[in-house]
Amino acid sequence: AVEVAGQVESEALATLRRVFGYESFRGEQEAVVEHVVGGGDAVVLMPTGGGKSLCYQIPALVRPGTGIVVSPLIALMQDQVDALRAVGVRAGFINSTQDFDERRLVEAEFTAGELDLLYLAPERLRLDSTQDLLSRGKIAVFAIDEAHCVSQWGHDFRPDYLALSVLGERWPDVPRIALTATATKATHQEIVQRLGMPAARHFVASFDRPNIQYRIVPKADPKKQLLAFLREEHAGDAGIVYCLSRNSVEKTAEFLTANGITAVPYHAGLDAGVRAKNQARFLREEGLVVVATIAFGMGIDKPDVRFVAHLDLPKSVEGYYQETGRAGRDGLPSTAWMAYGLNDVIQQRKLIQSGEGDEAFRRRAQSHLDAMLALCETARCRRGQLLDYFGQDPEPTGCGNCDTCLTPPETWDGTVAAQKVLSTVVRLQRERGQKFGAVQIIDILLGKRTGKVIQFDHDQLSVFGIGQDLAEGEWRGVIRQLLAQGLLAVEGEYGTLVLTEGSGTVLRREREVPLRKEPKRAA
Ligand code: ADP
Ligand code: ZN
């Protein structure tokens, strides 16, 4: 401890103030830092923007030796190191973007004890040469960032992380700190087990972001809905719009620009110079909208992002939470808005079916998507569902700051409607050996004599026209919810609808199918 102006403050707090210019620690930071400075292992779960970096940077500065930071985000290392150097921290990195001489220089600095922090990509640490290098210097702490990458069941598995268990074996006296923003209870346990940190203390910050309002609206005309949302609620605000494909990123950015909103595109297919420029504008300018694929956002630290909008469905709740978490880091009211519809479900299911990876991989992707769909279709508090997912106990009465709390959705008994859809699929499959997508099924239900209906004689089916009690949009809602509940499935590259094991229970009237009513208002 050091004495400053008659006040005794810990070395950690003194470092926080002197080096980083912050007055006090936030939340769990202080407890984490004290524990690691004292030589203990720690597993830290903190949401994005929670302040994980200081949890290892301060111990690295306070303890003798260099803090080794393992991070998969090679693209961010240069920025992180620059930011540290700007405040006088002796930082360096070793990764594949460097040439031989640059690397040699950093290695020499490390062995000479001239570095406070050294960033390494996980694939580096597997190499004997890297481990030998580390043995030639003094290590203050190992920080394993994005620790959820070690989880084979997680959404972001990286095999190189498995080799990190060697750290505890080879350097048993060096404290280790594993950090992540996205961990369910299962991932949390996997981190402990795979990194070999049974004695670690656990620090779990709340995943709640009370200033973010969560809203998921039914998708009708997404670009127009987005425009109305921006005009009515976020005129002149900075925000991020996420789209799945590069093409829709460009189209949406053009559309917003044509409608008087300052918007720029960002995706991996753009020239690196354009990307850097658009990112820099986003950080610097006020009220710029970035339309992006998920390539955008990692490590971007802009406190006043007022909204994050999704025009396409994220693949997992983890991804959704991470992306929406970029809104409102300054604690001021912000919105996480998403338009979601039947095509999202079909498209994501198709991507999984036709994508690469073995059967286990597909099953995993499927269960991640199912959790995301459950969040979209839930009639309960969205925040409650999110916190539940991350293993935290939510407010039993709802949060009061999500769409389902603000305007509780009505539910209705969709059993008969579900039976009509499923019977139509049965008729086609069993009687005709045919498989069709949602459009044809709905046309049959509505009794529409379209070209394709006539061509296949579908107006002769007994189910033709039995669904005229509901409108087309309502049928899309029914099919979407059946898909989300696993009572119907998507097959093949054309996204045809097929029965599941669950379908039978509905057709045999063994269960009821409560459905969410499709709201009339789109936003
Ligand atoms: P994470 O890695 O958890 O996403 P960061 O470590 O990047 O979060 O921190 C997010 C932001 O909060 C940064 O701008 C950081 O400087 C700021 N911050 C972190 N801790 C403090 C603190 N104790 N006081 C003030 N600002 C802080
Ligand atoms: Zn709520």
Image (cartoon, rainbow, N blue to C red):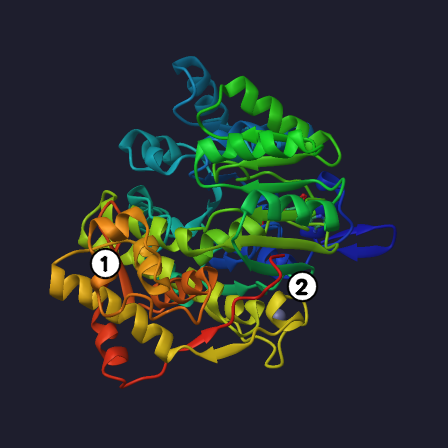
Query: Comparing marks 1 and 2, which lies closer to the viewer?
Result: 1
Residue 322: image location, x then y, percent: 52, 51
Q: Residue at x 52, y 46 (%)?
A: 311
Q: Residue at x 18, y 62 (%)?
A: 428
Callout 2 crowding tier (Cα within 10 Å): few <14, some 14–19, many ≥20: some
Decide if residue 32 is on the left or right side of residue 284: left
Q: Tell me the CA gap for discs 1 and 2.
A: 51 Å
Callout 1 crowding tier (Cα within 10 Å): few <14, some 14–19, many ≥20: many
Q: Is mark 2 within 8 Å of ligand 2?
A: no
Relative height, residue 329 to residue 93 (above, below): below
- The quadrant in which the N terminus is found is bottom right
Residue 176 visible in the current orientation: no
Q: Of callouts 1 and 2, which one flags the residue occurring earlier in the amino acid sequence? A: 2
Residue 378: image location, x then y, percent: 49, 70
Find residue 210 and name its label.
Answer: 2
Considering every residue shown, the one lying at the far right of the view is: 5
Residue 483: image location, x then y, percent: 34, 63
Is residue 438 or residue 129 the one in the foreground? Answer: 438
Find residue 458 and name its label.
Answer: 1
Q: Residue at x 71, y 32 (%)?
A: 260
- Label 1 SS: helix
- Label 2 SS: loop
